[in-house]
Amino acid sequence: MRLAAAILITLAWLAPSTLTAQALAPPVIEAFDTPNDDGASVTVTWPVNPDAPEGTKYRVLVAEAESGPFYLASEVAAGTSLLSDDPGNYGHDEANFLIQAVKVTEYTVSDETRKLTTDKTYFLRVSVLTGSAETRGAVTSAIPESNLFNTSRLNNFLIGAFLSVVILLSIALARRRELYVRRIAGLEALDEALGRATEMGKPVLFIHGLQGMDKISTIAAVGILGRVAQRTAEYDTELKVTNTDPVVLSVSQETVKTAYLEAGRPDAYREDNIFVAGTEQFSYAAAVEGMMLRERPAAHIMMGYFYAESLLLAETGSTTGAIQIAGSDAYTQLPFFVTTCDYTLLGEELYAASAYLSREPRLMGSLKGQDIGKMILLAVIVVGTVLSTFGVPHLAQAFSAY
């Protein structure tokens, strides 16, 4: 008897995984179309088994017929890949931490990977693998379907709609009365710089950054260029515009031409004064620096997104004695502009420049509406942080981006 007991104990010690696997029943699974997707996946869920021994794995198998054959789609360890990992689709319920979930998008047949097809029935089962023993559960089915609306982005839609209403109301208000915008010294100094160039009989040099027309900083710079061109046309002052991109060149030419036409001075427009000074970063900087030293413009206006050439341009310009006004949303280059230029537009001041200079109701209303929206979001951040600190995360969750 003692010998038989010793043999049984030894076998249990040598093969614990086999005995455990026999005692571990396969989970009861649910399979359904994955919400908020394009219809190319299904999700399989089952309860977390707290008694699963370490090393236990779950294999998700897929078949195109109920009788099989079944192919491996995914393999996860016990207690991992939880429903709570996707709060955008399944919410923040604490029960989600007790449910394992696997999103199935493809499965492997021999060496071939097959993707799930929309509106086709697939049969799924989950097997439990502990050591070398594997037990398979019951078969269930699911159909992947495409969804017309992504409900996980509903909060983004509502926030965007609310801010749009705020901006529209601000535009309506701007059409009735003038809205207050704080003074921006760099923009106030534009007339001073252009007036000085007119008195000295020297040109104004407008310098674009290195990015193309698909960037917001370049679009803002073109808006400022239009206001500068109107002033130079009125003052009969020569305006030269440099850039690195052919598209920016074309837009700048049309902007300046339109400004001169609106000012009643189409004859003063010179297309050759708007040109590509160079297509590479430092060749562009060298060409513009040469212009600064040879022609000695009375005013340098640098607007857009700049890189390392910012200090080269601004330092060279400061040695000529010109008034320099710079504006950029490149925070790494702003210190160089601040130390070498007379006036600098910091970050969003560049975006506000067009509205500030024109005082056009639509632009002013948009600017004011965006400021109101930012104040609301800042208040939400502060309140949400305080509530989350005290264990009430609902506001923070409502503004989460999924």
Image (tube, rainbow, N blue to C red):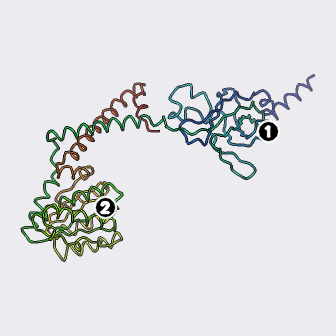
Which amino acid type corresponds to the residue marked 2 in the rendered image?
Phe
- Quarter holding residue 290: bottom left
For the residue labelled by badge 1, is the local secondary structure a helix, a strand or a loop? loop
Q: Which residue carries the number 1 mark?
A: 132
Quadrant in the picture for residue 372 = top left
Q: Which residue is mark 2?
A: 306
How many neighbours does mark 1 have within 10 angstroms: few (below 14), some (14-19), or many (20 or more)?
few
In the rendered image, the vertical position of residue 123 relative to residue 315, given as above or below = above
Position of residue 139 measured from the top left corner of the image (x, y, whole percent): 74, 32
**SS category of the residue bearing label 2:** loop
Quarter where residue 295 is shown = bottom left
In the rendered image, the residue lying farthest to the left is 199
Q: Establish if 230 lies above or below 13.
A: below
- Residue shown at 75% from the left, 36% from the top: 129
Residue 186 lies left or right of residue 167; in this view the side is left
Which amino acid, mark 1? Ser
Residue 254 versus residue 382: which sits nearer the camera?
254
